[in-house]
Image (cartoon, rainbow, N blue to C red):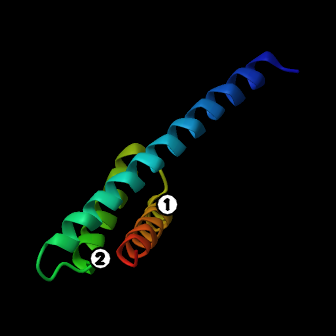
Amino acid sequence: MNKKLDLNRKKIAKLDDQILKLAAQRMKIAKEIERIKRDSEDQKIIRKTVEDEKIEQYRTAAKRLGVNPNFAQALLYLLISESTREQVNQRQR
């Protein structure tokens, strides 16, 4: 096999592993945020204004990094959806 191709595939595999580890860390923090929200008065799990601000930040950062902003937004939606699901599940326990 082409050595350059193999090397680049290994680099991508490492990056994929790092991405997954970061997502796991994000989910842990999302659970902690839910605990904080639960202890606070009138803290909803879903806060549209916070999500909208984060989406705009992602799109801006994506443009700066040369990444398709629509891809970045879709990625963020996945992260937000899973964080929300985790928070809802935790609240129901």
Q: Which is more foreground, mark 2 or mark 1?
A: 2
**Mark 1 residue crowding within 10 angstroms, few (<14) / some (14–19) / many (20+):** some
What is the three-letter code of the residue carrying label 1? Leu
On the image, the x and y values in percent for residue 56 come to: 30, 65
Identify the residue at horizontal 77%, vertical 23% (top origin).
Answer: 6
Q: Which residue is most to the top? A: 3
Q: Residue 10 versus residue 29: which sits nearer the camera?
A: 29
Residue 40 point in image, percent of width and height: 13, 73
Distance between the Cα atoms at labels 2 and 1? 20 Å
Residue shown at 88%/21% (left/top)?
A: 1
Instruction: Please state which amino acid type lies under the numbered disc 2.
Output: Ile
Left or right, residue 90 beside residue 19? left
Where 66 sits versus 58, above or below? above
Q: Quadrant of residue 15?
A: top right
Q: Position of residue 92 (x, y in %)?
A: 39, 79
Q: Nearer the viewer, residue 77 or 20?
A: 20
The residue positioned farthest toward the front in the image shown: 93
Q: Residues within 10 Å of mark 2 (few under 14, many from 20)?
A: some
The disc, 2 or 1, on the residue closer to the chain's N-terminal end is 2
Tell me the number on the disc at residue 45: 2
Q: Mark 2: which secondary structure?
A: loop
Quadrant (top left, top right, bottom left, bottom right) of the C terminus: bottom left
**What numbered label is drawn on residue 47?**
none
Residue 55 placement (x, y as % from top left): 34, 66
Kind of element beneath mark 1: helix
Decide: marks 2, 1 in contact (CB < 8 A)? no
The one nearer the camera, 86 or 60, is 86
Give the residue drawn at x 39%, y 70%.
90
**44, above or below 3, in the image:** below
The residue under label 1 is: 75
